[in-house]
Amino acid sequence: MTRAEFSYASDSFKGDDESGNLRPRRLRLSASLRRLVTETDVIPRNLVMPIFVKEGQGIREKIDSMPGIFRLSPDEMLDREISEISSAGINSVLVFGLPNRKDAFGSEAFNDNGIVQQAVRRIKQNEPDIVVICDVCMCEYTDHGHCGILNQGGYVQNDVTIEYLGKIAVSQVRAGADIVAPSAMMDNQVLAIRRALDSNGFGETPIMAYSSKYASAFYGPFREAAGATPSFGDRKSYQMDPSNVREAMRETGIDVEQGADIIMVKPALAYLDVIRAVREKFDLPLAAYNVSGEYSMIKAASANGWINEEKVVDEVLHSIRRAGADIIISYFAKDYANRWNKS
Ligand code: PBG
């Protein structure tokens, strides 16, 4: 729309007199004026695309609760997805694995030939410049679905678990991972992983810590996607209580002290205030995870014709950035980037 299409005259505009010169609408008059004063941008290179890899061949399996997202085998299926992601201008992927075999100790998670390790090698071979981040957790690998090692009573044991997390991280980095991202919410997991990496010659590998990860119902679709629902109980004895924000400062502070290189808030949308609070207190790069439930809600509403998916996604990603996140992990990353490239 051009300026000429508007006329203040008919609105009996009297100019910048005392009574009417505070007019924010002036800067909203046309698309180009609005662009000029844009405060927040979401750029593909700051987005991370999560991917699910599954053992087998020729697999590209739909995830019912997450339309548009697939479980891929570490072969041409994965190659194709990675090349799409990278040609969309996305710089980084976060890898989750679905092993064939689960046990009480999540052994497949630290098997040098495990599913994530295979996938990482394959990605780095084909697209060496893509930043490969590996989720360091046990819930996809344990037969009970909890994020650590249980005692007789079914309680997740902290100090045993962090030793395992260290082993997992080392194995992922040995396969070629550029960043490891501990998400188990065990105390001192960052320290244990830092020590394990350093003593194995990986002192240069950064840790992206899921510092404030809440016990959230928004992970529902992910648990279907990754087959990681706990077989009993819930994760409230390790993940954070959604009502707390001061506790997020404490958790983040501990991770920073223990050597985290990037900190995270997860989920994003119901926790924008936490993102803002962390941003104001800490200087490290801050990631926010726009989680599976946040993705599925938008997909479901748009499939019903109730909302405009693209506009809602733009709005949501901008809100996360506006709250203070530098990096956004989102299942919308690839679609958003493709759209951004055309705009
Ligand atoms: C592993 C892990 C989970 C998610 C990321 N890493 C599941 C959970 O904690 O239950 C959730 C991601 C999403 O919902 O998109 N612990």
Image (cartoon, rainbow, N blue to C red):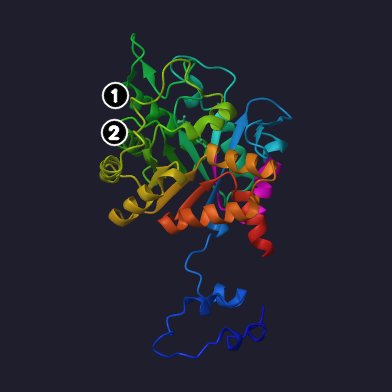
Query: Tag 1: residue type?
Result: Asp
* In front of the other: 183 or 38: 38
The kind of secondary structure element at disc 1 is: helix
Q: Which image quarter: residue 254?
A: top left
Q: Earlier in the sequence, mark 1 or mark 2?
A: 1
Q: Residue at x 50, y 91 (%)?
A: 14
Query: Is the N terminus in the top left, top right, bottom left or bottom right quadrant?
Result: bottom right
The residue labelled by disc 2 is 188
Q: Position of residue 110 (x, y in %)?
A: 47, 26
The reply to whether dot 1 and dot 2 touch (C-beta < 8 Å) is: yes
Instruction: Tell me if residue 221 is in the magenta stretch.
Output: no
Q: Position of residue 327 (x, y in %)?
A: 47, 52
Mark 1 Cα shell of 10 Å, populated few (<14), some (14-19), many (≥20): some
Q: Residue 103 shows which numbered tag?
A: none
Q: Position of residue 37 (x, y in %)?
A: 50, 74
* In front of the other: 291 or 86: 291
* In front of the other: 26 or 342: 26
The kind of secondary structure element at disc 2 is: loop
Q: Residue at x 41, y 49 (%)?
A: 272
* Residue stretch rendered in magenta on the structure: 79-94
Q: Is mark 1 within 8 Å of ligand 1?
A: no
The residue labelled by disc 1 is 159
